[in-house]
Image: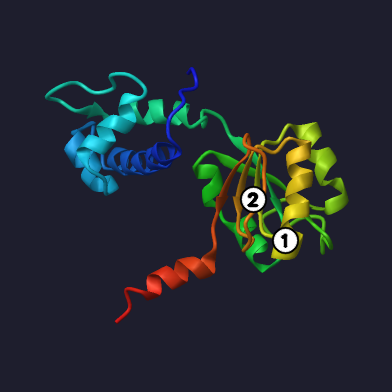
Amino acid sequence: MTRVDIPRKSIYRLSIYQRCLQRLKENDVDTVSSEALAKAAGVKSTQLRKDLGYFGPLGTRGLGYNVDSLSKTIHEVLGRTKLQPVILVGVGNLGSALLRYGGFRKEGFEVVSSFDLAPKSRTSAAGIPIKPMSQMVDYIRANTVKMAILTVPANSAQGVVNDMVAAGIQAILNFSPTVLDVPENVVVNSVDLAVELENLSYFIR
């Protein structure tokens, strides 16, 4: 499928729509209206139709969307028609927990290797190799890896990112509590667990 230039927020919502469609398929639902899918995703139906409209007419007026067909289209748009290799950098407590998480592969991502300053063993509990940081750049280049998960301390994050980007990494899921400086062609999604908890605390009474 030809890459379509759409807003980043729309790309994020496509992932939400995909999860809703997966649940519908698991419940043997063949078609869904824009109103029903939008409600399940927590957005307005006008927003859903706008997001999906970037890829041409995907639904049938009066009938809605074919669940399987729409799911396959979004899969292609998100580049998940085959397993996407990912590396993880920083095998501390959080990194180790992420390596044990079994949901990545189900969603189309495969953590192929991990890197740490002091690898304690050659493989993690999940069977994923843990290599020394000195091998990271060569590994990225040799295996054409484009995505990385970053779980290193804040004071070393930028230096690690500079090396990853120079080696060819284009997308980073950042768990380090710091703002990263990257080129325009590199996308960073940051997850600050403390900030998320702080936001949740507002709703506690």
Front tag of 2 and 1? 2
Instruction: Look at the numbered disc 2 and give the secondary structure of its residue.
Output: strand
Classed neighbour count for the residue bearing mark 2: other residues with Cα under 10 Å, few (<14), some (14–19), many (≥20): many
Tag 1 residue: 91
Q: Is residue 156 above or below residue 147?
A: below
| Furthest-bottom residue in this view | 205
Classed neighbour count for the residue bearing mark 1: other residues with Cα under 10 Å, few (<14), some (14–19), many (≥20): many
Tag 2 residue: 149
Q: Is residue 114 visible?
A: no
Q: Residue at x 19, y 21 (%)?
A: 60
Nearer to me, 95 or 182: 182
**For residue 177, what is the image quadrant?**
bottom right
Percent x, y of residue 165: 73, 40
Spatial separation of the CA atoms under disc 2 and disc 1 = 10 Å
Nearer to me, 60 or 183: 183
Mark on residue 29? none
Identify which amino acid the numbered label 2 is placed on: Ile
Answer left or right for 61 relative to 57. Answer: left
Percent x, y of residue 152: 71, 61
Percent x, y of residue 50: 29, 31
Nearer to me, 105 or 167: 167
Q: Choose the circle earlier in sequence order: 2 or 1.
A: 1
Please give the count of numbered marks on the rendered protein. Answer: 2
Q: Is residue 127 above or below residue 93?
A: above
Answer left or right for 148 relative to 79. Answer: right
